[in-house]
């Protein structure tokens, strides 16, 4: 029943001719209207169920750090050695208004705090408290274009620590990006995010495995397809055989 009404809702919008698909076929709606409706539709259809949240007392004393824990890329080291004062998060690609945000800018955006369990595909879990800017608000600010289907996170680190090594990256779809618990975290356990855990900024989304949660985020890119990025599977580990959707 629920699914049926969702489908009917999408159908009704399609008949109005202003959603992304109908618009590209008829070319009738103005970009602004089409974009607003498109984003609203995507939010409405988002998989909204929340991952479990925990209490302060549940926080792990020793939250493991995994994968890259101390990037050696020159660009990263220079930023780190200056306390990330010169760090700018870039939000670009299929957006009307590309953004370049300092950490202070990010701290002025709507925050969310959540205590959640992190599950790594390697078989360990830790509970931590995360605070960060809601990705949905940032994407609204940058104004996603109607053709945007995925959000790609490009990171500073190469897992082999070589300057020419392939940089870590991963991607999520628009509903995941708009989920309430999807944040760009700058604090962990009430302290500024440390280098081992992804300073200055790392992704938290709480219904997928750890490898989707990009640490050391340099740049966020809205794309229609990730076929041309890396080996085309949507992420560093995805290119090496891991599932693109790593639902827990
Ligand atoms: N940039 C970057 N992000 C990354 C990784 C990485 O190596 N580089 N490892 C991933 C994996 S496999 C896990 S389990 C988590 C680990 O996060 P943590 O170090 O805070 O525990 O980060 C994920 N994000
Ligand atoms: Mo992991």
Image (spheres, rainbow, N blue to C red):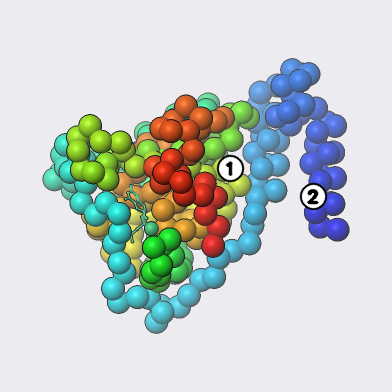
Q: Secondary structure at mark 2?
A: helix
Left or right of 135, for residue 7: right
* Alpha carbons under labels 2 and 1: distance apart: 17 Å
The residue under the point 63% across, 29% down is 146
| Mark 1 surroundings within 10 Å by alpha-carbon count, few (fewer than 14), some (14 through 19), many (20 or more) | many
Give the quadrant of ligand 2.
Answer: bottom left
Q: What residue would you read off at disc 1?
A: 174
Q: Position of residue 103 (x, y in %)?
A: 31, 46
Q: What residue would you read off at disc 2?
A: 6
Q: Quadrant of the N terminus?
A: bottom right
Left or right of 156, for residue 18: right
Q: Position of residue 204 (x, y in %)?
A: 44, 55
The residue under the point 37% across, 38% down is 154
Q: Is residue 163 visible?
A: yes
Q: Is residue 111 visible?
A: no
Q: Secondary structure at mark 1?
A: helix
Compared with 200, 31 (above or below) is above
| In-front residue for pair 72/11 | 72
Compared with 182, 153 (above or below) is above
Q: Is mark 1 within 8 Å of ligand 1?
A: no
The residue under the point 79% across, 41% down is 10
């Amino acid at each position: 029943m629920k699914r049926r009404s969702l489908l009917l809702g999408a159908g009704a919008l399609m008949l109005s001719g202003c959603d992304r698909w109908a618009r590209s076929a008829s070319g009738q709606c103005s970009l602004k209207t089409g974009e607003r409706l498109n984003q609203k539709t995507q939010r409405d259809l988002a998989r909204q169920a929340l991952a479990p949240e925990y209490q302060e007392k549940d926080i792990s004393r020793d939250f493991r750090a995994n994968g890259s824990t101390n990037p050696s890329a020159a660009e990263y080291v220079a930023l780190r050695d200056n306390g990330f004062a010169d760090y700018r998060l870039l939000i670009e690609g299929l957006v009307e208004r590309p953004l370049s945000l300092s950490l202070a800018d990010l701290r002025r955006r709507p925050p969310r705090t959540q205590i959640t369990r992190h599950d790594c595909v390697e078989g360990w879990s830790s509970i931590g408290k995360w605070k960060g800017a809601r990705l949905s608000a940032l994407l609204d600010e940058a104004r996603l274009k109607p053709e945007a289907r995925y959000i790609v996170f490009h990171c500073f680190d190469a897992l082999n620590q070589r300057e020419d090594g392939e940089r870590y990256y991963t991607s999520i779809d628009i509903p995941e990006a708009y989920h309430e618990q999807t944040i760009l975290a700058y604090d962990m356990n009430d302290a500024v995010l440390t280098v081992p855990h992804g300073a200055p900024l790392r992704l938290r989304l709480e219904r997928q495995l750890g490898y989707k949660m990009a640490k050391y985020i340099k740049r966020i890119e809205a794309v229609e397809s990730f076929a041309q990025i890396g080996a085309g599977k949507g992420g560093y580990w995805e290119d090496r055989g891991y599932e693109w959707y790593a639902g827990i």
